[in-house]
Image (cartoon, coloured by chain):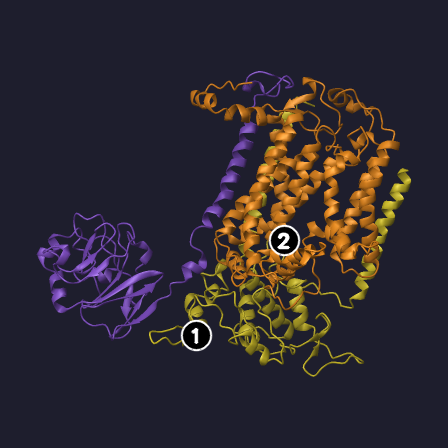
Chain colours: A orange, B yellow, C purple
Amino acid sequence: MALQSQNKVVRWIDHRLPIFTFMNHELNEYPTPKNLNYWWNYGSLAGIMLLIMIITGIFLAMEYTPNVNLAFDSVERIMRDVNYGWLIRYIHMNGASFFFIVTYIHIFRGLYFGSYKQPRELLWMIGVVILLCMMATAFMGYVLPWGQMSFWGATVITNLFSAVPLVGNEIVTWLWGGFSVDNPTLNRFYALHYLLPFVILGIVGLHVMALHTHGSNNPLGIDRKGPQDSIPFHPYYTIKDMFGLGVFLLIFCGFVFFGPNLLGDPANYIRANPLQTPPEIVPEWYFLPFYAMLRSVPDILFIKAKLAGVLAMFGSIGLLFILPWLDTSPVRSARFRPVYKWVFWLLVIDIVLLAMVGAHRPEGLWVIAGRLGTLYYFVHFLILFPLIGIFERPLPLPNSISEAVTKKGGGKVAGATAPMEKP
Amino acid sequence: MRKHVLALGLAALGFVVLSSGAMAQEEAMPPLAKQKWSFDGPFGTYDRAALQRGFEVFQNVCSNCHSLKLVTYGDYGPGGPGGGLGYNDDEVKAIAAAKETTDGPNDQGEMFQRPARASDHIVPPFPNDQANRAAHNGALPPDLSLIVKAREGNADYVYGILTGYKPTPAGMKMPDTMQYNEHFPGHQISMPAPLSDDLVTYADGTKATTAQEAHDVVTFLQWAAEPHLEDRKRTGVKVMIFLLFMTGVLYAAKRKIWASVH
Amino acid sequence: MAETAQPGPVDAHTPEGGTRRDFLSIAATAIAGVGAACALWPLVDSMNPAADTLAAGAPIDVDLKSLQPGQQIIVLWRSRPIFIVRRTPDQVTKLATPEVKGQLRDPQSAANQQPPYAQNDSRSVKPEYLVLVGICTHLGCIPEFVPQPGGSLGASWQGGYFCPCHGSRYDLAGRVFQNVPAPYNLPVPPYHFVSDTVIRVGENPADSTFDFNSVEQI
């Protein structure tokens, strides 16, 4: 539908470059299920976080120096001497954490309400690519301040690739550009850390394109049957997203202004020292579950523990790509899946457990907990997912979104308020 | 099914709680006592008198072995972050000029010594880490610029170290160059107990007990590590008030717009 | 867009029972806009000179013992070239002559391009020594020191500075000539004599509070 604007200039431009029609189509009148709950806020929040990170990052880059002798001091100069440097850096630093919080909630929402199922498989897979790019960006960004955790985190994570059979050591040397993590490594990480966010931005474009092809999933997981099930994105979801953003910013700014180092490791305020490893190397919290898997896997037959751990870590994300085909249930929303609804929470508990394992030295009970947690993660996706879909008897689905919404007051509709929903 | 799953989940949680308890016992460290700091809380500020006393302790005691490389003399003055320690420009000049720093090369190509200026970084006690190690039995006194932020426990930890010297427990072997400190990881610390009663004479007449000295110098070191703390908290309060107001209006607008849908 | 609830022109996307432009929506948008604008300020301000940049540029001492009459030395202060010239008595006398002053844009140094203690015919504390910031007030090039009269700069050239970029000309007090692109005289930095032959560039004499940042153009 062409844009019908009163403004002559807008019409003149739009006739030649239909940018206003496009924006009107995708952001204004874009039809959205009328029953989205607040768990659907996290997609746009993640987009806003990406923009905040890019903007603060560009201004930090103006003051930062990627050289092993100067990097730490240049970051401290930002914190002490640059006008509002402390604010921009604390936003960027805590922004990484909050970007992951938002993204993880976004992913779990997709898992609970079956957003990855037909016809949104590619939408989901593109999302997994975004997650991988985010992880790479966050990891390389964490190296830049050149503190103790930066240096030793970089050493440990790049050494993962030495587990690759035959050419492992060559790959690691290539990654480093030398014989240890050093100036060439810092420089290439800086270059890539600046590049990748823009790659992510492009992939987010594809993500939104795929989303707008079939529209948002919804808490009922049933398709929209007609106009009565939809409302235009603007103003309904713009205002809802804005309100959600306000609440989010309150929490985010609480951390930035009143506890900016709560989520960070004190050891990163110590200048990198290649001669001394910190007593405990712990990644940022958002990598802890994966870090736990890396350390937990024992020797399996002819595969050494080192390689097995690396495979488990990458595999844990890799299997998300085939998730749409692992899930055999035709029903999307966990609200109508009496078994899956509970198994979902087991995964949440499992990942929290793995995060705790990752934060502790691999001793005693933590080793066993790590192994069980890793095992369950794979059992969950590779065995429980297909089996539940086959044996579970889903509850009857409502006929349409609008019917379910109008009946909601009576509490008659199947799948009464699920634990993950806000009333 | 549901019950089984719940039971499993609870078991997992219970396991986590139990095991973290077990882990905590392994490290036989007394818990750090929570001190009262002027910079605590959302409205915390630096107590200027404590900062200046802390500076006196740093200047007379700590700075004999420890550097403070990220701080400049100018930071102490009114041009420093958040107004510095409360010294005026002349006092800063005098503090700086008391130290000699290396500059150059001059026209003859030689390095020379000159009194430090406000724009100079705090002159370190030793020209390099190796010289510092050599003077301390091979142990390197760390730079103190970020020490409060660089240790788990932050200000309470540094205070704990400064006041945590105890006689070596019977049965523990202690090398001659080491001391027992209940808060130091491993309990063997190279630094001899740095503070004692009346070690410094405060300009403002405060009684210089060990606890008072420790409290003051930690306040000073917190300032050195996070000089913009007051700025940050002040801005934060304003930002939070604005966001609360904005979110309230957004909520009202959201209610109004959605009224017709529900 | 068959699926939209209320298909039609843009303005139709309004909830029933109220216009989109109602007070609350406008207020919410305005407040969010103000918030976003305020959030931009720290970013913009971060590009201003940082505290360490401002604190640097401490005064420098220059020993003039070996400087011969007619010679110039260049030193660096706040990463800017400072010209220091020891003028001959003859060169000093010429600065006050009407023939020279008649060709200048600002012969009395009326524009704020020097501390008050250098607002005189020689634009200096001691007429013998000229101290200038050697940056052309046109577009920031460094003018050449051409003390000899005549030569390729024409018969009327009495010695001074010639900017190679766009041909601006200054006399031996850094005063700009008429009909050249540069608008102002070369700035004089704050300085004073610590001893007979040592000057301190970047610091006023004890009785002056001249602020170098207040000059018209550097």
| Numbered disc in front, either 2 or 1 | 1
**Image spot of residue A335 (x, y percent):** 80, 31
Amino acid at circle 1: Thr
**Image spot of residue A256 (x, y percent):** 60, 50
Whether residue A289 can be seen here: no
Amino acid at circle 2: Gly
Quadrant hosting residue C115: bottom left
Query: Could you say whether the residue bearing mark 2 is in a helix, strand or loop?
Result: loop
Q: Quadrant of the C terminus of chain A?
A: top right
Query: Label for residue B102?
Result: 1
Query: Could you say whether the residue bearing mark 1 is in a helix, strand or loop?
Result: strand
**Image spot of residue A116 (x, y percent):** 73, 33
Residue A325 versus residue A262 in the image, above or below: above
Residue B35 versus residue A31 in the image, above or below: below
Given residues C75 and A45, the one toward you in this image is C75
What residue did someone put label 2 on? A259
Marks 2 and 1: same chain?
no
Q: Quadrant of the N terminus of chain A?
A: top right
Query: Label for residue B76?
Result: none
Provide the chain ID for the residue under circle 2. A
Whether residue A170 can be seen here: yes
Provide the chain ID for the residue under circle 1. B
Given residues A373 and C23, the one toward you in this image is A373
